[in-house]
Image (spheres, helix red, strand yellow):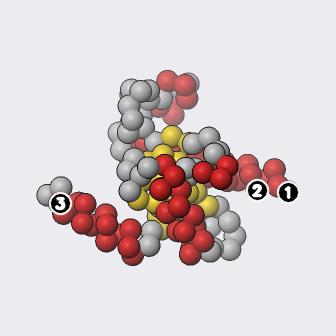
Amino acid sequence: MANRSKAKGTAWESAVADYLNEQLGQYRELWKDDDRAVRWKDPLDPDNVRRNVQEGAADIGDLGVRPFAGECKAEKQFDLASYVRQAEAEAKNAGQPFGVAYVKRPRAKTEDGYAVTSIRTHAAIVKALREAGH
């Protein structure tokens, strides 16, 4: 059962990373038709969304989505407070200003899942965008 849950979590992490990379223009056109090893436009680009290696006590999140640390959750029962708390702690560990929890929506496409933050984080994002002229 643990392996099945881990596989489900890994699949969700990969799906979110692929979706974000595709939407952010990090993957080559028609990347799904080729070898996944050559999906990147620029493999060294720091803006590529990547799955992180588990770091134990100083975990940096499941995904590096600069300027976010992303925590992926694919569970039957949601615990948003826990997810956000974990994402914010991992953002600090990763040296990123924002934490976000990517929560799988049951029986829905990846893009219909949820990106959850605290209102504190949301306010900081709005402030940063406004300061950048948006």
- Residue 57 as seen in the image, left or right of residue 123: right
* Whole-number angstrom distance, CA of label 3 to CA of label 1: 47 Å
**Residue beneath disc 2:** 5
Comparing 95 with 54, the one in front is: 95
**Residue beneath disc 1:** 1
Q: Quadrant of residue 103?
A: bottom right
Q: Indicate whether 120 appears above or below 8.
A: below
**Element marked by disc 3:** helix
**Residue beneath disc 3:** 131
- Residue 115 as seen in the image, left or right of residue 57: left
> Which tag, 3 or 2, sits closer to the chain's start?
2
How many C-alpha atoms fall within 10 Å of the one at disc 3: few (<14), some, or many (≥20)? Answer: few
**Element marked by disc 1:** loop
> Which tag, 3 or 1, sits closer to the chain's start?
1
How many C-alpha atoms fall within 10 Å of the one at disc 1: few (<14), some, or many (≥20)? Answer: few
* Whole-number angstrom distance, CA of label 3 to CA of label 2: 41 Å
- Residue 46 as seen in the image, left or right of residue 16: left
What amino acid is at disc 3? Glu
Rendered location of residue 3, percent (x, y): 81, 50
Residue at (70% x, 53% y) in the render: 8
Residue 28 visible, this angle? no
Mark 1 and mark 3 in contact (Cβ < 8 Å)?
no
What amino acid is at disc 1? Met
Q: Indicate whether 92 appears above or below 32.
A: below
What amino acid is at disc 2? Ser
Q: Quadrant of the N terminus?
A: bottom right
